[in-house]
Amino acid sequence: MAEENKVILHKTYASSYAMRVELALKIKGIQFEYVDEDLSNKSPELLKYNPVHKKVPLLVHNGKPVSESLIILEYIDETWKTGPLILPQDPYERARVRFWANFIDQHLIPSTRKVWSTTGEEQEKAKEEIMEKLRILEEELKTTNHENDNLGLLQILLVTLFGSYKVYEEVLGMKILVPENTPLLYSCVTSLNKLPLVKEVCPPHDKMVALLSVYRQKLLKSNTN
């Protein structure tokens, strides 16, 4: 019977996209196996099951692959009806949540990447771009039910993106998530960080600082070449 419902998650240690999927699986109470991928030496299974993008996260359910984190999250919610809902049942509310999930992935995350690969005035410009998008998100939080202990789709995205905000401050030397600018967003993320399931998924602070320091140096070096 176990083989009939076998779930395998291909992930890397510091991938926020993979953390989304891991957290969703834990929310639903789904038993699963890990495959920690080395992206410099990808496993044959990753190349076989995700031949287009060849990246994580990759969910394999009974031998059937599902890729792209947002698609995986919806798949999990639709496949396992037990446990808390990740997306609302109401069609309008589902559409609304999908809109803001797309805003985070298509607009906010590309802006955050810029602060990692720049310095000086260029980095400050990238920071202001992030702050502008966070203010837009803050306004949305004012109009929606954002209970801090409810791990729905948007909460999953927010805590896996900003849950390590203190790491970002240490590595980048700047504050992005601050209560004075976005009090609802700050309160939401800090409250989510206290949840046991979130603590299980988020890597330790010191290890993240070491990993992201190397990541930033690689980006800065590649920009100067």
Image (spheres, helix red, strand yellow):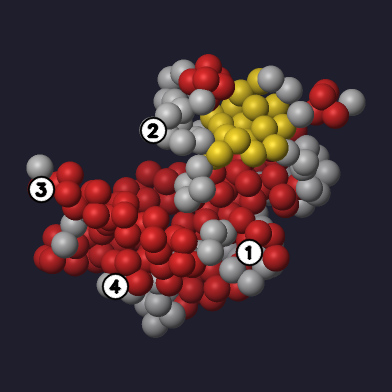
Q: Nearer the viewer, mark 3 or mark 2?
A: 2
Viewer can see residue 192: yes
Choose the circle earlier in sequence order: 4 or 1: 4
Disc on the earlier residue, 3 or 2: 2
Mark 1 or mark 2, which is nearer to you?
2
31 left or right of 40?
A: right
Give the residue at x 32% y 67%.
171
**Which residue does the image show at 26% across and 59% down from the upper left?**
115
**Badge 1 or badge 3: first in the primary sequence:** 1
Q: Nearer the viewer, mark 3 or mark 4?
A: 3
CA gap, disc 3 and disc 4:
22 Å
Callout 3: SS: helix
Label for residue 40? 2
Q: Is residue 71 left or right of residue 166?
A: right
Kind of residue indicated by mark 2: Ser
Q: Residues within 10 Å of mark 2 (few under 14, many from 20)?
A: few
Of the numbered discs 3 and 4, the one sitting upstream in the chain is 4
Question: Please, what is the three-letter code of the amino acid marked with disc 4?
Answer: Met
The C terminus lies in which quarter of the figure? top left
Residue 188 in picture, x, y percent from top left: 56, 70
Helix, strand or loop status at disc 2: loop
Q: Is residue 89 above or below residue 67?
A: below
Q: Quadrant of residue 70?
A: top right
User: How far is mark 1 from mark 2, CA to CA?
Assistant: 28 Å
Question: What residue sits right under mark 1 in the picture?
Answer: 199
Amino acid type shown at disc 1: Lys
Judge the density around disc 1: few (<14), some (14-19), many (≥20) Cα neighbours within 10 Å.
Answer: some
In this view, 140 is above or below 34? below
Q: Position of residue 213 (x, y in %)?
A: 32, 59
Residues at marks 4 and 2, CA–CA distance in whole angstroms: 30 Å
Task: Please rate how many residues cluster around mark 4, counting C-alpha atoms within 10 Å: few if below 14, some from 14 to 19, many from 20.
Answer: some
Circle 3 residue: 224
